[in-house]
């Protein structure tokens, strides 16, 4: 039988209806915390100062009318936290005492205070964009009351925890799990203990202050990753999901997300060792994305101006020995072309069209009246309205005096990247993709402007893709030799399989589909259990 090549799993699963929930972007949550003590702010500040991760037991937490008792609350954050702030970011643990207690399956509620973000939507918008390309937290907004006083609008972000990795990575959640933020964080980059994946010692104790190990074991596996990046980078795919890393790096660069591995302190990401013994990255803490965190490297010389952020090199940090995840991966010509293909996809799908700006305004419309009533916000309501387009220069908070307007930064950045010599080379054109299921699954496609092409397939969402070359030699289900139609095949293993095509020339590469998060399916019975992000 013959099946169309553009059978997208996401579309086939579109009949699955999801109920509104804690992270529904079209609604604002209502959260009320009642403390036993009137001096709760002082107590939370004191726990934060001790910095042992301790929670304050609270009388109750109410979420959208549902009441919970015996919960734990603590302040979170680094740059966004200050004991003088009118509103600080919060972490609520619903199962602090009652271990089965949850809201819609979620035990943790993490609320960011929109520090350095007059728009209030930087974080939610960033995660929404990123989730198109890799697994990332859900996010929306919540109104918060503390002991009956309205503390305003917060960003409500899904926690990256065991529940998250179990949901996305088909695991029991007990594998090595690393939060890549320094353990002794008393401010960004304290003591130079950056989680940069630089391999400096075979002794795991050397790294204890650089990383927060969230699992019962994992130091040996983390050292193996760092050693591989330094000494055996060609084998990185054996210990690392390289493609997801390339998506993360492309996102960081495109959106000027410098409070990340790409920026000054090489932080704010997680690594989880999946069932294939490969570390999978997950981005975290996007509240200062779109240039609100302008530090490319530690020290005053690393502070980028708005003009510099608009024209930041798409290969920035690729020669930096202290960023092996960037330097070593982009030193591989194919991985570099894949990275640039991902960057081009993010750019074209979100910023060249201006879709991001319309989405920012739509997200603001959900929270506008509640932000206007928020007397504890860091910026004026006028700044909230204007910062989608206009750069704000009003002294900021914590030394961040310039907060780029989203369109001021990203429209110029889109123009710069679109004309950058790393982006302008023409990639291959892949079209007319078809499959024929016989003794094997035979795939062919018209591929132009290409020097090579590969077919990648798998039979399960959690599996690693296997790869085989595609040929235009008349002997691989490709028609006549030299006609531009490339062909190949892979085995049949039941009714379900997923595949994609990657082609490249000397200067550029292209995936089909462009988002490897949407994989062609050769099955008439798609696996709707598969998430849209892989």
Image: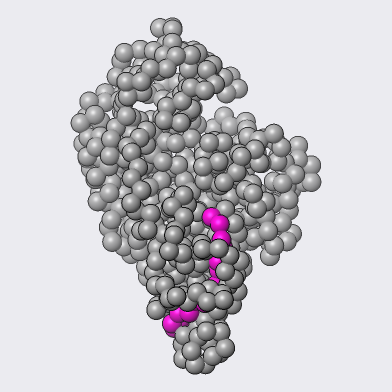
Q: Residue 338 location, x and y as percent?
A: 52, 67
| Residue 490 in sight | yes
Give yes or no for residue 460 being in the magenta stretch: yes
Q: Nearer the viewer, residue 87 or 448?
A: 448
Determine the image quadrant of residue 4. bottom left
Residue 350 lies, with reference to residue 295, above or below; the image says below
Q: Nearer the viewer, residue 31 or 124?
A: 31
Residue 231 lies, with reference to residue 176, above or below; the image says below
Q: Nearer the viewer, residue 224 or 297?
A: 224
Magenta segment, prevailing SS (helix, strand or loop): strand
Give yes or no for residue 54 being in the magenta stretch: no
Color theme of the render:
one colour
- State the residue at coordinates (41%, 41%): 138
- State the residue at coordinates (55%, 41%): 166
Q: Residue 327 location, x and y as percent?
A: 61, 60
Residue 78 lies, with reference to residue 460, above or below; the image says above
Q: Residue extending furthest top?
A: 37
Q: Is residue 392 left or right of residue 197?
A: left
- State the residue at coordinates (20%, 31%): 369
Q: Is residue 87 left or right of residue 72?
A: left
| Residue 313 in sight | no
Q: Is residue 355 left or right of residue 229?
A: left
Q: Residue 121 location, x and y as percent?
A: 32, 41
- State the residue at coordinates (47%, 67%): 522
Tally of numbered discs:
0
Quarter of the image containing the N terminus?
Answer: bottom left
Q: Nearer the viewer, residue 475 or 254?
A: 475
Residue range of the region highlighted in magenta in the rendering: 442-461
Determine the image quadrant of residue 473. bottom right
Residue 177 lies, with reference to residue 423, above or below; the image says above
Q: Residue 40 location, x and y as percent?
A: 44, 12
């Amino acid at each position: 039988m013959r099946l169309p090549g553009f059978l997208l799993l996401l579309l086939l699963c579109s009949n699955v209806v999801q109920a509104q929930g804690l992270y529904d972007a079209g609604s604002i949550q209502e959260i009320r915390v009642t403390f036993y003590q009137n001096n709760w702010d002082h107590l939370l500040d004191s726990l934060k100062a001790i910095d042992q991760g301790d929670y304050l037991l609270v009388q109750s937490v109410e979420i959208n009318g549902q009441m919970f008792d015996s919960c734990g609350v603590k302040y979170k954050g680094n740059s966004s936290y200050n004991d003088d702030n009118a509103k600080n970011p919060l972490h609520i643990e619903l199962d602090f005492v009652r271990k089965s207690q949850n809201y819609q399956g979620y035990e943790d509620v993490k609320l960011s205070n929109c520090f350095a973000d007059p728009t209030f939507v930087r974080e939610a918008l960033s995660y929404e964009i990123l989730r198109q390309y890799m697994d990332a937290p859900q996010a929306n907004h919540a109104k918060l009351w503390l002991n009956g006083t309205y503390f305003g609008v917060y960003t409500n972000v899904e926690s990256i925890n065991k529940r998250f990795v179990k949901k996305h990575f088909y695991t029991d959640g007990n594998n090595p799990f690393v939060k890549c933020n320094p353990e002794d964080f008393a401010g960004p980059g304290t003591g130079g203990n950056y989680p940069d994946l630089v391999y400096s010692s075979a002794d795991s104790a050397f790294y204890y202050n650089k990383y927060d190990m969230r699992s019962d074991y994992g130091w040996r596996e983390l050292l193996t990753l760092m050693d591989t990046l330094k000494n055996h980078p060609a084998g990185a795919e054996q210990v690392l999901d390289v493609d997801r890393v390339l998506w993360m790096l492309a996102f960081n660069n495109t959106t000027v997300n410098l409070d990340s591995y790409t920026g000054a302190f090489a932080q704010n990401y997680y690594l989880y060792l999946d069932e294939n013994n490969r570390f999978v990255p997950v981005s975290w803490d996007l509240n200062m994305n779109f240039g609100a965190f302008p530090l490319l490297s530690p020290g005053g010389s690393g502070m980028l101006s708005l003009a510099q952020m608009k024209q930041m090199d798409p290969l920035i940090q690729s020669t930096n020995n202290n960023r092996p995840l960037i330097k070593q991966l982009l030193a591989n010509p194919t991985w570099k072309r894949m990275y640039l293909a991902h960057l081009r996809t993010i750019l074209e799908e979100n910023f060249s069209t201006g879709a991001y700006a319309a989405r920012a305004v739509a997200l603001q419309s959900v929270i506008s009246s509640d932000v206007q009533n928020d007397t504890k916000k860091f910026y004026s309501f006028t700044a909230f309205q204007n910062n989608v387009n206009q750069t704000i220069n009003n002294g900021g908070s914590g030394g961040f005096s310039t907060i780029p307007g989203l369109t001021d930064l990203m429209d110029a950045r889109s123009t710069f990247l679109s004309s950058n010599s790393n982006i302008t080379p023409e990639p291959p054109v892949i079209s007319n993709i078809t499959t024929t299921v016989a003794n094997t699954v035979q795939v062919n496609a018209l591929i132009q402007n290409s020097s090579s092409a590969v077919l990648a397939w798998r039979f399960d969402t959690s599996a690693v893709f296997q790869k085989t070359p595609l040929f235009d030699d008349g002997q691989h289900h490709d028609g006549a030799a030299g006609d531009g139609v490339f062909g190949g095949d892979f085995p049949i293993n039941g009714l379900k399989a997923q595949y994609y095509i990657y082609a490249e020339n000397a200067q550029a590469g292209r995936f089909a589909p462009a988002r490897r998060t949407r994989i062609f399916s050769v099955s008439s019975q798609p696996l709707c259990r598969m998430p849209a992000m892989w």
